[in-house]
Amino acid sequence: GRLGTAAEVAISDDLRNAYSVAGQIYASLDAAVGSDHLAVNFFLDRGADTWAQDLAKLSAEVGECDMSAPLTATSALSGEFTWVCTHGRLQGSLLLAPTQPVRIQNLELEAITL
């Protein structure tokens, strides 16, 4: 039987699009490039300037990343991913706001160096 195994959550188009935006944000080192896809509260705890500093630090730590890794949906509005990078890995998670249209409410990125 399948007792004890979690059901796989399907990846919605909104989550897939948000994942693409997360890649654009990291590649450009600028969260503002995704502004059309960010919830109104995205920059409340960490402003655009702080995002730029944090992204530059991550990039210096792990380098360029292959962003073709699959996204794993953890719910209809959230997902996790791990990108393999030049000098390590980047673990990330996305949380979408339940708005119409759906926007990115939270993006977490954490370096895992080798």
Image (cartoon, rainbow, N blue to C red):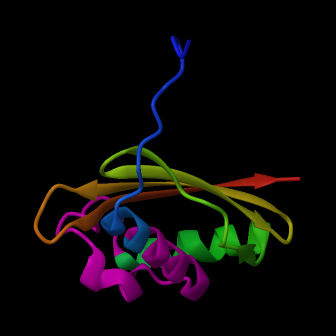
Q: Is residue 18 left or right of residue 37?
A: right
Q: Quadrant of residue 38?
A: bottom left
Label count reads 0
Is the residue 68 above or below the residue 113 in the image?
A: below
Determine the image quadrant of residue 70: bottom right
* Main secondary structure found in the magenta portion: helix
For the point 73% across and 73% down, which residue is it? 65
Left or right of residue 27, residue 20 in this image: left
Against 102, residue 73 (above or below) is above
Instruction: Please give the name of the residue rendered at 45% of the width and 31% of the height, measured from the top-left corner.
Output: 7
- Residue 22 lies within the magenta run: yes
Q: Is residue 105 magenta?
A: no
Give x and y (percent) for residue 40.
Answer: 17, 69
Q: Depth check: 56 or 64 in front?
A: 64
Residue visible at 31% across and 67% down? Answer: 14
Residue at coordinates 54% horizontally, 20% vertically from top-left? 5
Part of the protein shown in magenta: 18-47
Nearest the viewer among 9 and 1 is 1
Q: Splitting the image into 4 quarters, where does residue 111 fall? A: bottom right
Q: Position of residue 87 (x, y in %)?
A: 86, 66
Q: Check the image and report above or below for 13 versus 9.
A: below
Between residue 86 and residue 74, name the one nearer to us.
74
Please identify the residue farthest to the front as the structure is shown: 1
Where is residue 89 shown, x and y percent of the image? 76, 58
Query: Percent x, y for residue 92?
Result: 56, 55
Which residue is farthest left? 100
Q: Nearer the viewer, residue 28 or 73?
A: 73
Quadrant where the N terminus lies?
A: top right
Left or right, residue 32 beside residue 87: left
